[in-house]
Amino acid sequence: MDPLTNEDVADILALLDSLPYDEFDLETPRFRLSLRRTPGGWTQSTEVHAAPGGAAVGRAAPGGPALGVKGPLPPSIGGDGTFTPVGGDRSGAGEADEADAARGEADAARGEADAAGGEAGGVEGDGGSGDAGLVVVRAPLPGTFYRAPRPGAAPFAEVGSRVGADTVIGIVETMKLMNSVPAGVAGVVAEFCVTNAELVAQGAALLRIRTEE
Amino acid sequence: MILRRVLIANRGEIAVRVIRTCRRLGIETVLAVSGADADAVPARMADTTIAIGSYLDVDAVVAAAVAARADAIHPGYGFLSENPRLARACETAGVVFIGPSAEVLEAAGDKLAARAHAVAAGLPVLPGGLVSAGAGGADGADGAGVEEAQAVAGRIGYPVLVKAAGGGGGRGLRVVRDPADLAGAVEVGSAEARAAFGDGRVYLERYVAAGRHVEVQLLGDGENVIHLGDRDCSVQRRYQKLIEEAPAPRLGETLRVGMRAAAVAFGQHLKYQGLGTVEFLVDAGRSEFWFLEVNARIQVEHPVTEAVTGLDLVAEQIAVAEGRRLRLSQASVRLDGHAIECRINAEDPAAGFRPSPGRVTSAVFPAGPGVRVDTHIQAGSAVPPQYDSLLAKLVVSGASRAEALDRLRGALARCEIGGVATTVPVHAALAADGEFAAGGVSTEFLARWLGRQTRPVRDKNG
C-alpha cells in the first residue's frame, strides 16, 4: 500500500505552516509518516511496513511462477537471494551460508583495514597458515567475482599462473561497475578461494599467491 | 484495451514511481522481485509480488506476467526496458508491453540502426562504427575483433568513445586516447554492457571532450509525435548523470528550437509510440548539435520534465499502451519554470565514488513547496551490491532557475541518510558552486570541478 503522495504531503505541510506545530506523525497499519519543522524547512521520513501476516512470496516454481501473498522469503530461495551485504542481518540462510557469512564478516573487517591503507584489493600475508610465502588477495568491494573478462573467455589467471603486482587476476562487479582486481604482489597463483560468478563480501579472500624470494 | 493489472519488471525507485501512478489510475500492481528485493519498499507497496530470479530474464518476466494474469508489463528503465525480445515475447503471450514496438526498440537499441534512422530523418551525427568483437561469441574471435576495433577507431580518429551498442544509460562507456588501450577498453566495456543489458556488443564513436548533453523528451502514439521540452544532463561523472535539469539553461532559442524539431522529426520517422528521449551532444558555442542516441523508455530524469509540464509521464505511457491517441497536442504542452534533479547514489565521494552497498540506518528527506523526492529507501532498507547505486532522486522546482537552485541548497541541507555513504555532499558543494550556478556547463565540468576540490567532499553523516 501506498504511503502518501508528494501532493498529500504538500497539502499537510500547507496546513501545518499555519499551525503552531513542529512535528507531525501519522501512523497507519501500512506506513508511518513523520514530518519535522527544522530551521531550514520541513523534513519527512516514511516507513512503509511489511505486509502483516504475510505467508510466502509468490515464487517461480519448476512448473512456472506462482502468485502469492507478500511476506518474508522462504529459506530455500537461491540465486541472488542468498547474499547479504556485510553487516546486514541474514534471514533464512542455510548452515553453510552462515559459516560463509561469518567468514565473510571476519574477512570484511580485514578488508576495511586494507581499504583504509590502500586503494584496490587488499593483499596480506597468510598469517594463519604460517606460510610466510603465501599472500591472500582480497575483494576490494562486495560484489560478484569473475575470473574471466566475459563469459566463455579464458580466465585472467589459473592455478600455477605467474603474476606480477599489476596483473589483473579477476573482476569484482559491484553495483554494475566492473572493478579490476590486481594481484598486488608478484608470484605464482597457489589457489582460488572462491569460484567464478560467486558473490563475495568486501575483503573476502579471492585467491592465494605464492611469492618468490 | 483498458489495463487493469500491470506487472512491474523492475526494482528501486522506478518501481515505486510506477506503482504510485498505477494506484492513482486504479490499476492493480504485481511487482516482480528478485530474492534480494523481496522485502524492499516497492515490494511492500505493490498489491502483490511474484518472485523471479533475475530482472534480465525475459522468459521469467513474461511467465510471471502470465501467471499473475497481468494485462501489461511496465519495464521501467534499464534491465529489459529496451529489449525487443521482451516486447516480442509479450506480443506472443498476449501481454501489452508498455513501451515502443519491438521494431522501434530494434531500431533505437542498435547504435548503427539508430544512426542510420537519424541520418534518414535529417539529423546530424558523429562519425562512428560497430565492433562485433564485443559480442563475445566463440573463443578465438578475440583477435579478429581487436583488429576490427582498431580499423574502426583508425577511421574515426582518436580519441574514440567505446559505448554499449545494446543500451544507453552510460554503461560500458570508455574514452580511448591511445590505440594501445583500445583492446582492453573494448573488453571491459563489453563486459559492463553485458552485465547491464545482457548484450555485450560495443560501438565506437568520435569523442567530443567539451560538449553539452541535452536531450528532448518525446511522446508519440505511433502517428502523432510531440516533444515535452528539453533537459540538460551535462553534469556527469564517467558518463553517469549526476544532475539533470529542465529546461536546458543558456541554450539559445535557435539551438533549442532546432533540437526539438529534430527530435520530433526523428520520432515521426520511427512512427514512435510511447515515451522516448532523443539525446544530443551540443556545442553551444558554435550552435551545433549531433544525434547521440534514442532512449526508448522512461528515463531516470523524467521528473524534471514532469515538474515543468505538470504531466504524469507514466500515466501518458499507460494511455498510449492502452491504444489511445495522444491526449495532448503540441500547443497544449506548457513549459513553466525550472526544475533540477540530483541523483543521490550509494557511493562514497571521499573514496573516489566507491560503491557503498550496505544497510540504510536512517533516511530523512526534505519536504515542502517545490520539493519532490522519489526513493525506495527508508530506515532499515538493504542496498544490495548486485544492483545500481541510485538511492533517491531529489527534485526541486521554482519559477526560475535561481529559485530552484535556492530551494536545492536548502533541500540538500535537510537530507540525512545514514548507514551508507552517499553523493549528497557532492550535490551540496555543486549547488554552492559559482560555475554550476551560472548554468550551461559541459560534460567535462564535473571531473574538472572534482579535481579542484582541495579537500575530499565528505558526508556530514560519517
Image (cartoon, coloured by chain):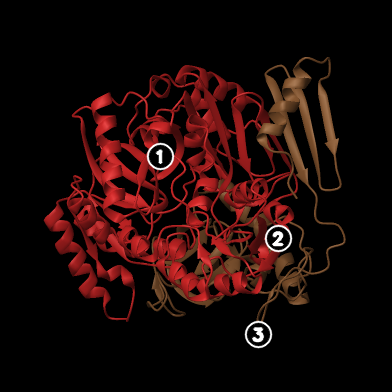
Chain colours: A brown, B red
* Frontmost residue, A210 versus A49: A49
Q: Report crowding for label 1: few under 14, some 14 to 19, many 20 or more residues within 10 A (C-alpha).
A: some
Measured Cα–Cα span from mark 1 to mark 2: 34 Å
Instruction: Give how far across and how far down residue B128 sits, in percent.
Output: 20, 55
Q: Residue at x 61, y 58 (%)?
A: A202
Element at label 2: helix
Q: Nearer the viewer, mark 3 or mark 1?
A: 3
Q: Secondary structure at mark 1?
A: strand
User: What residue sits 30% from the left and 62% below the top?
Assistant: B202
Q: Residue furthest left?
A: B155
> Would residue B456 be visible to someone looking at this image?
no
Mark 2: amino acid: Glu
Identify the amino acid type marked 1: Gln
Percent position (x, y) of residue A158? Answer: 44, 78
* Residue under pointer 1: B236
Tell me the residue that label 3 is attached to.
A63
The dot on residue B394 is none
Q: Which mark is residue A105?
A: 2
Question: Numbered disc 3: what chain?
Answer: A
Please give the chain letter of the residue carrying mark 1.
Answer: B
The amino acid beneath tag 3 is Gly
- Per the model, the C-alpha gap separating discs 2 and 3 is 37 Å
Q: Residues within 10 Å of mark 2 (few under 14, many from 20)?
A: many
The quarter of the picture where the N terminus of chain B appears is bottom right
Image position, residue A203 (x, y; %): 60, 59
The number of discs equals 3
Q: Residue at x 55, y 25 (%)?
A: B408
What separation in Å lies between label 3 and label 1 (alpha carbons)? Answer: 45 Å
Q: Is residue B331 above or below residue B300?
A: above
